[in-house]
């Protein structure tokens, strides 16, 4: 497995394929907001804490992980179904932690595979709120995270 960090120009070139991959294999758990964020991400320069990485196996896309502002703006991971038992998600998340030093994500409580991935890589749940789909959702942090970085009012959905 090869992990590649995408530059803004690479992302701009690959964006249609990555969005199609996320829509097709995200099991309808990737929010429209997250897909819009990825679609609209600048081709000039990424903001601090933004990382887009892909996992390639035998010259084929096996997974994608993306963080905007360490995950405070957006975070998503999608792994092709044929690679979900092959530690692709874990490898991508460990890679992101190494590259960014800290990450945050929000996961609906009924998304057991994503929660299992987060907990298996050492992320810690520190706040519960009602997510954009009306489901109980957890804020999780990993690496050198600090709960005070999250200033979102979950009820209103406002961000700093």
Image: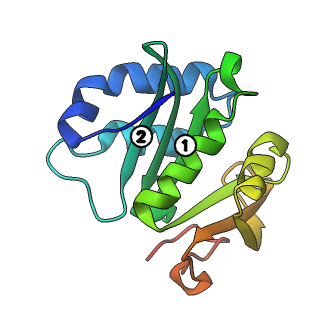
- Tell me the residue at 69%/20% (across/down): 81
Q: Is residue 122 above or below residue 18?
A: below
For label 1, the residue is 92
* Percent of width and height locating residue 47: 27, 60
Q: Give the CA separation, mark 2 to mark 1.
A: 7 Å
Marked residue nearer the N-terminal end (2 or 1): 2
Q: Secondary structure at mark 1?
A: helix
Tell me, yes or no, whether the two marked residues, 2 and 1, touch with CB atoms within 8 Å: yes
Left or right: 28, with 10 as reference point: right
Mark 2 Cα-neighbour bin, 10 Å: few <14, some 14–19, many ≥20:
many
- Tell me the residue at 47%/59% (across/down): 98
Question: Residue furthest toward the bottom?
Answer: 148
- Asked if residue 69 shows in the view, the reply is yes
Q: Is residue 83 above or below residue 41?
A: above
- Tell me the residue at 14%/47% (across/down): 44
Mark number, residue 12: none
Mark number, residue 53: 2
């Amino acid at each position: 497995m090869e992990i590649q960090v995408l530059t803004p120009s690479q992302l701009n070139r690959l964006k249609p394929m990555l969005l199609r991959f996320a829509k097709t294999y995200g099991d309808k758990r990737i929010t429209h907001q997250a897909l819009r964020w990825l679609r609209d991400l600048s081709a000039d320069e990424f903001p601090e804490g933004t990382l887009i990485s892909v996992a390639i196996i035998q010259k084929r896309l096996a997974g994608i992980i993306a963080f905007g502002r360490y995950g405070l703006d957006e975070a998503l991971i999608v792994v092709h179904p044929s690679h979900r038992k092959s530690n692709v998600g874990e490898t991508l998340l460990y890679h992101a932690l190494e590259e960014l030093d800290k990450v945050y994500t929000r996961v609906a409580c009924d998304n057991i595979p994503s929660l299992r991935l987060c907990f298996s890589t050492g992320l810690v749940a520190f706040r519960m709120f009602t997510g954009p789909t009306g489901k109980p959702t957890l804020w999780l942090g990993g690496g050198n995270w600090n709960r005070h970085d999250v200033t979102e009012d979950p009820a209103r959905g406002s961000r700093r």
